[in-house]
Amino acid sequence: MNNLKGRQMQARAKKIIPGMTQLLSKRPDMFSSGVWPAYYSKAKGAEVWDLDGNRYIDMSISGIGANILGYADPYVNAAVHEAVDAGSSSSLNCFEEVELAELLCRIHPWAEKARFARSGGEAMAVAVRIARAFTGRDKVAFCGYHGWHDWYLAANLGAGNALGEHCLPGLDPRGVPKGLAGTAFPFRYNHIEELEAIVKTHKDELGVIVMEPIRSEQPAPGFLEGVRALADETGAVFIFDEISAGFRMNTGGAHLLLGVMPDIAVFSKAMGNGFPIAAVIGKGPVMDAAQNSFISSTMWTERIGPVAALATIKKHMDVNAGKHLTAVGTEIQNGWKRAAAKHGLSINAGGIPPLSHFSFEYDNASEMKALFIQIMLEKGFLASNIFYAMYAHEEPHVREYLDAAGRAFGEIADANRSGAVGKLLKGEPSGAGFRRLT
């Protein structure tokens, strides 16, 4: 497979862009550097073309979960084109943000007000700022991954690798003010006792509890209810980060299915089908605390984001996208398990079906992952050990992918038994955490 133009672009990027890309999860070394194409020229439906003209079926990260309907969805794109032609920004505000706020609050009846941003990380920073403004307290307890901002990375100040199980191992908080040390405390999913310990020590100073409602595992009975009760007991604002889980299994937040309501919920990624948009919705008195702080940005007022979100949510609702995404993800997970059993491979597969993942249970797992990526590229698939479902994924895509993945598992099993996995790699083993690019 020819990837000369792609490799040349990567070499140019390494010289001029610190870290090579704007998103760590899209760096080629997270897949297999030297093999992963990294740059695209065109994307449509479930298909992607790289700079060298190679065409792939994307059965990997689907825009890191942003393209919930599929690439260049015609319904969403038509709405965006109309908005661009009508003027994407002006000295006045776009009325679509009012319509989007009303729609999100109708979908989530517990919420009364909304604010908007354009990316998930900044929306989480907005939500935490609002929560701190409301409670007048600085300390945050959190579970899971919530972005790159200071409030979150502060957990690693003087605490070694506190974020290791939540973000990436080895993440250096350099540049985060040292004065934020002791303001953010992690607890693990389904470990209510860890949050209880944080509450016991910091009860009078704890202003915010932040977590994803669901991600890699189902909540244990009473866990989410227990977190809600602790928030009520301490007076902390309870925030659900729905940036990844939202719009996967249903139209709206996953917490609607789980039956536990927060004080604030944050959305981004899938809500705009790849166009920049993020929302912070919440209870009226809590959200009104935004006016007691300063939260404002020019590009939060442009029109494309709200228009894309309105179109995405409408189509998502009309086609019951959550049902399709769940069915596709379930079929993929079951297919991985069948193929692994057939070829005697030990894997661990899980995640909510629309956000599926597997891992090779071997010491050379990073090499095995890179070999899987390499083999699947040669078979015409963008594929890793992560699968994010899109509405554009149809039965033929799934069937052809699972057939190719099964054959790849067979090749990997044979290579592993003969000790040849590393010798077969044309690129580098897959990265497992944060590291500087040199």
Image (cartoon, rainbow, N blue to C red):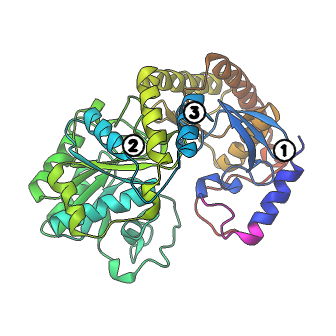
Res 78 label: 3
Kind of residue at disc 1 = Leu
Kind of residue at disc 2 = Glu
Kind of residue at disc 3 = Ala
Residue found at x 9% / y 54%: 233
- Determine which residue is flagged by label 2: 96
How far from the left and from the top, in percent, is residue 239?
27, 51
**The stretch drawn in magenta includes residue 336:** no
Q: Is residue 196 above or below residue 244?
A: below
In front: label 1 or label 3? 3
* Residue 270 in view, yes or no: no
- Image-quadrant location for residue 180: bottom left
Question: Foreground residue, 59 or 87?
Answer: 87
- Please report contact status of discs 2 and 3: CB closer than 8 Å, yes or no: no
How far from the left and from the top, in percent, is residue 298?
44, 63
Magenta-tinted stretch: 14-22
Give the CA distance from mark 2 to mark 1.
Answer: 53 Å
Instruction: Say which label, 1 or 3, has the lower sequence index.
Output: 3
Res 268 label: none
- Determine which residue is flagged by label 1: 424
- Image-quadrant location for residue 252: top left
- Image-quadrant location for residue 108: top left
